[in-house]
Image (cartoon, grey):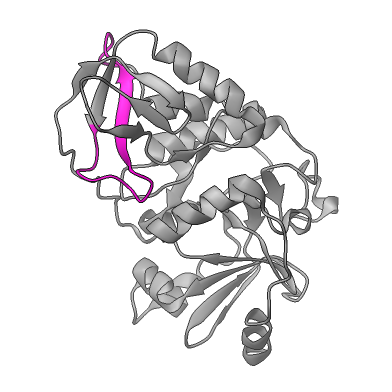
Amino acid sequence: MFQDHSTHSNSTIEPVKWGDFATRLLSVFVWTLGLLVIVSASNVSASEWRCGTEINGSASADQAVTEPALRTSLSVEAVDAFTSVDLPGLKLKLPDVTFVPEVEAESLAWLRSASAAKVSVTLLADRPDFLGRTIAEVKESSNITASDWQLQLLNAGLAMLLPQGSRELRALVQAEDQAISAEIGMWADQNAATSYHVSTFPASAGINLPSVTDAVGRFVVVDGIIQSIEHQEWRSYLNFGKDWRRDFTIALGKETRESLFGAQDFQSRLDRLVGAKTRVRGVIENRGGPYIALHNLAWFCVMSE
């Protein structure tokens, strides 16, 4: 059984056209090595979710802020490119979010409206990414309790959560989950060919979401319940159906599973996740059935009991 799964998982992926959005996401994926949040048919609060290393009880370690906050004006050139005369030579972007074509114009309009007044900018990195952009926290400077731009964008369904570091994610997870539950912004689309939110549940479960089998070749958020787990020397398979040749599977490589549960006791601790409600994000591959190879633990969450 394990050998069959391993052999099939190494088969050639059927060619698909991912489009510009997926291409951008894959570039980020390669750079950061890139959630899974658990969902149920009824609404749940983000306080019940454990994501990444929180699944094993370890808290996220926020990256240190390298610069003090700066009150400045921003020029928004694109959804992921801001500049300021007070930060010459820097092109800024928000951390841990990405934008999709379907709502990009609306997202850009929101950002330009929010930048009409001066804002508070805090650099979160001392060097740019591979595209020359420096990640920065941005919030209204006139209100010290104002939420970050990415939090507001996620809450409005105008951005997708895409963790890229070790920053605290709980508030962002909650904001996105509220938008998903309300089906607003990008999450309003329930078309099987274009939706960014899909499910592993069978139609009989009454979940009003497109099937993950309709999302091969696209970057999506997938909800499901782990049915079984298979362990092999170099990876573990999280199966979401009785037949892995047809049903959805998440593959955890050796380093990924050991980062989550350690090298000695990963099998028994992973096995405790059977029956857990989960949400994962990534590009759906076709390896017999729909399949995600997970490399970024922050893209994987489990609902706490």
User: What is the magenta segment's predominant secondary structure?
Assistant: loop
Residue at 72%, 61% (x, y): give it: 16
Q: Residue 152 appears in which quarter of the rendering?
A: top left
The N terminus is located in which quarter?
Answer: bottom right
Across and down, in percent, residue 186 comes to 64, 32
Which residue is located at x 28 percent, y 22 percent? 84
Question: Residue 2: horizontal and vertical position, in percent?
Answer: 62, 88
- Who's the residue at 47% across and 57% down the image? 29
Residue 298 appears anywhere in the view: yes
- The reply, left or right, for residue 169 in relation to residue 290 is left
Relative to 199, say whether 110 is above or below: above
| Furthest residue toward front | 89
The image quadrant that residue 216 belongs to is bottom right
Image position of 201 with respect to 82: above or below: below
In the rendered image, residue 33 lying in the magenta stretch gets the answer no
- Magenta residue span: 123-145
* 115 left or right, relative to 218: left
Judged left or right of residue 126, residue 105 is right
Where residue 199 appears, as percent x and y from the top left, is 71, 51
Q: Residue 246 versus residue 7: which sits nearer the camera?
A: 7
Front position in the image: 299 or 119: 119
Which residue lies at the image location 63% right of the left edge and 91% below the top edge?
3
Q: Could you tell whether 51 is left or right of 58 in the image?
A: right
